[in-house]
């Protein structure tokens, strides 16, 4: 699964002279990352992450070359034959741009030590893990670090701008919630054309079924991005959809429940207000 992240470090300095943007020490979670930068320094790697105190080295810029990072999943697959690279971006006060291309296993892929990388004398160091479970574990750790830091700094809002540089960026990493749908729904989804008709701009964008589809697409997107999930502290709550008429409300609620394997009236519900303010709920 590919994922491209475009990064901008504004290089702003606090009145104290301290820069507030950077990226704390981390390894990338997936398989492999190709990184292109604009040549502005700041990126550092630690060759031996088990060594303390850590020794950080600047990564030199080579024009036209990508920086390649091994990710955690590759480390687990190869039983540490390939180690994931611990790296960070130090604030330098200079504006900086980078583009990171992450290649990760699919979320439902179980990452298990490769047979060629273990033996009786060298048993697997990590148990098999589903990619999504590993990612969520890491996102939860980051969320806890952010909460502790907020408490320390007495940050009231959820903005990250008051955080020290070392905690700025990874907090922005999205949580991904794996949604398991009935087989029939999953197969239908795979057959859907990849075009822009689901954003309501297509020729048949106004028909009722199409509108229902539009809401489905948005719900799936929000749901899989962690909205409405207890796993994701900042996005927990409810995804709400408004519809112009009772028929559409019922159709949408039923379909959300069916497609996400939820119970209508429990995890998925609806509320209809008619013009005399009578309310029907499930
Ligand atoms: O901006 C950089 O050079 C590094 C970015 C990075 O490590 C990341 O996005 O995971
Ligand atoms: Fe990284």
Image (cartoon, rainbow, N blue to C red):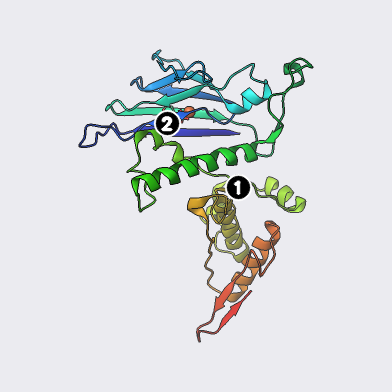
Q: Which label was assigned to residue 238?
A: none
Secondary structure, mark 1, is: loop
Q: Which residue is mark 1?
A: 177
Horizontal side, residue 123 vs residue 22: left or right:
right
71 and 55: which is toward the camera: 55
Q: Is residue 144 above or below residue 1?
A: below
The picture places residue 188, in percent across and down from the top left corner, at: 71, 50
Identify residue for label 2: 24
- Give neighbour class at mark 1: few <14, some 14-19, many 20+ (Cα, 10 Å): many
Extreme-left residue of the structure: 15
Query: Where does the N terminus fall, quadrant-wise?
Result: top right
Could you tell me if residue 182 is visible in this image?
Answer: yes
Residue drawn 57% across the image and 56% down it: 219
Q: CA distance from mark 1 to mark 2?
A: 24 Å
Instruction: Check disc 2: other Cα within 10 Å, few if <14, some if 14-19, many if 20+.
Output: some
Q: Secondary structure at mark 2?
A: strand
The answer to whether marks 1 and 2 mark residues whose Cβ atoms lie closer than 8 Å is: no
Residue found at the very far bottom of the displayed protein: 276
């Amino acid at each position: 699964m590919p994922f491209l992240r475009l990064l901008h470090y504004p290089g702003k300095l606090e009145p104290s002279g301290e820069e507030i943007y950077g990226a704390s020490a981390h390894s990338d979670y997936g398989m492999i990352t190709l990184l292109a930068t604009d040549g502005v320094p700041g990126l550092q790697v630690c060759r031996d992450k088990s060594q303390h105190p850590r020794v950080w080295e600047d990564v030199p810029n080579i024009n036209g070359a990508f920086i390649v990072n091994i990710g955690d999943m590759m480390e687990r697959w190869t039983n540490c034959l390939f180690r994931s690279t611990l790296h960070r971006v130090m604030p330098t006060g200079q504006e900086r741009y980078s583009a990171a291309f992450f290649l990760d296993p699919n979320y439902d892929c179980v990452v298990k030590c490769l047979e060629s990388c273990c033996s009786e004398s060298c048993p697997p160091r990590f148990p098999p893990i589903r990619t999504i479970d590993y990612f969520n574990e890491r996102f939860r750790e980051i969320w806890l670090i952010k909460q502790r830091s907020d408490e320390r700094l007495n940050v009231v809002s959820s903005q990250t701008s008051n955080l020290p540089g070392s905690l700025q960026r990874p907090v922005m990493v999205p949580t991904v919630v794996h949604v398991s749908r009935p087989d029939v729904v999953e197969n239908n989804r795979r057959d859907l054309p990849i075009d822009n008709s689901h954003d309501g701009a297509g020729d048949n964008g106004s028909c009722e079924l199409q509108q229902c589809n539009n809401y489905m697409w948005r719900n799936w997107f929000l749901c899989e991005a962690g909205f409405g999930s207890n796993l994701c502290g900042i996005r927990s709550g409810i995804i709400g959809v408004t519809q112009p008429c009772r028929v559409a409300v019922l159709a949408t609620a039923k379909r959300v429940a069916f497609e996400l394997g939820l119970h209508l009236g429990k995890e998925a519900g609806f509320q209809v207000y008619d013009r005399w303010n009578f309310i029907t709920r499930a």
